[in-house]
Amino acid sequence: MNGKSESPEALQFLGTPAVIRSAAMRQLMERIPRIAQSGAAVLVTGESGVGKEIVSKAIHQYSLRCSMPWVDVNCGALPEHLVESELFGYEKGAFSGADVAKKGLFELADEGTLFLDEVGELDARMQVKLLRVLDGAPYYKLGGTKKTSVKVRIITATNQDLEEAIGLGRFRADLFHRLCEVKVHVPPLRERPEDILPLAEFFLAQHGCSLRFSPEAGAALLSHSWSGNVRELRNVVIRAAIFASDGCIQVRDLPEGFVTDSLRIAAAEGALEGSTLEEVERRMILQALDRTGGQQGKAAESLGISRRTLSRKLKIYSAKEHSSAALAAC
């Protein structure tokens, strides 16, 4: 973490970079070529922002359809009344404003891959029509009199629990089983901490700056819960880069409320294995004092804590050292 940040080497899937360091993600990506070449419908699950689209693009890139179209759509971003026309297209005059015929996304993806993100947002009527098309039935465009047939590989993604949605009557069980011939789960960022710092450095490099993270800021990133996953990390890094000075991102440059106690942050799992929280705190404080030549004010600022807190911690350490010395003399 010392010195100039360099962009970690990133894989590219359909032009989208992917930084992968954790064992969990490496194992997942090792399975992708076999899944891709199977031709099976794939359901990619995981929390919002974990990288489900990147995994889906990797499936297409490794598939036998890699030279054919990749078409993607976020079902949750489409107004309900436009979903059918976007997926299946329409003929001229099908409705007011339909001045020319338009191909739907299924037709555009013919012989290739159609990626339906947030598939759990589809309403009941569209679920029925989607199921029929996936079962190979030709379909009518809106306002059309001639059926259209396509051969499309379907990859879907969701951050919802579709099996729970089935129990609640919000998602069709038959459609779920048709979409989920193979299920791929992308773990949240908090379960793959090895990816956090390489991703953070990659986003710094993408932002076009030569900043680096201080050890304390790096520890803070490692211990954050990352409810927004990779998307949240990217936003935090960009914001920190804007406010950082002296070529180094400090804890104080992270968003307000990002940490409540930067010393506790340093006890992130894997950051300093085998150390207790108190040992981590003491080590960080002494390192900060060493870097600042013993200036408590600057050391406290770099740690993101008040000078009063730093002074109190030093008094505790001093008292314990005196107590240990007295016991050893007995």
Image (cartoon, rainbow, N blue to C red):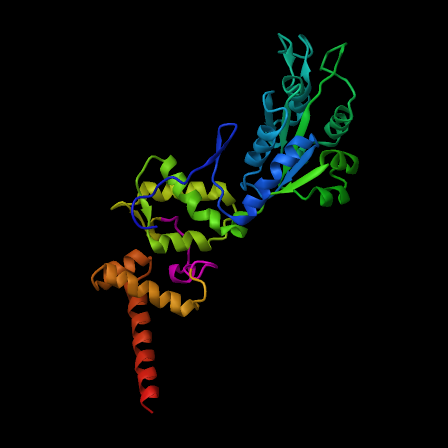
So how many labels did they put on this image? Answer: 0
Residue at coordinates 31% horizontally, 84% vertically from top-left? 325
Above or below: residue 162 compared with residue 80: below
Magenta-colored segment: predominant secondary structure: loop
Q: Quadrant of the C terminus?
A: bottom left
- The segment highlighted magenta reads 254-271
The answer to whether one can see residue 162 in this image is yes
Q: Quadrant of residue 239?
A: top left
Image position, residue 147 (x, y; %): 76, 13
Q: Magenta stretch: residue 324 in it?
A: no
Image position, residue 43 (x, y; %): 67, 37
Residue at coordinates 31% horizontally, 89% vertically from top-left? 329
Image position, residue 195 (x, y; %): 47, 47
In the rendered view, does 73 fall on the left or right side of 264? right
Above or below: residue 159 compared with residue 302: above
Q: Magenta stretch: residue 257 in it?
A: yes
In the rendered view, does 110 fall on the left or right side of 139? left
In the rendered view, does 204 fall on the left or right side of 268? left
The answer to whether one can see residue 75 in this image is no
Image position, residue 131 (x, y; %): 76, 28
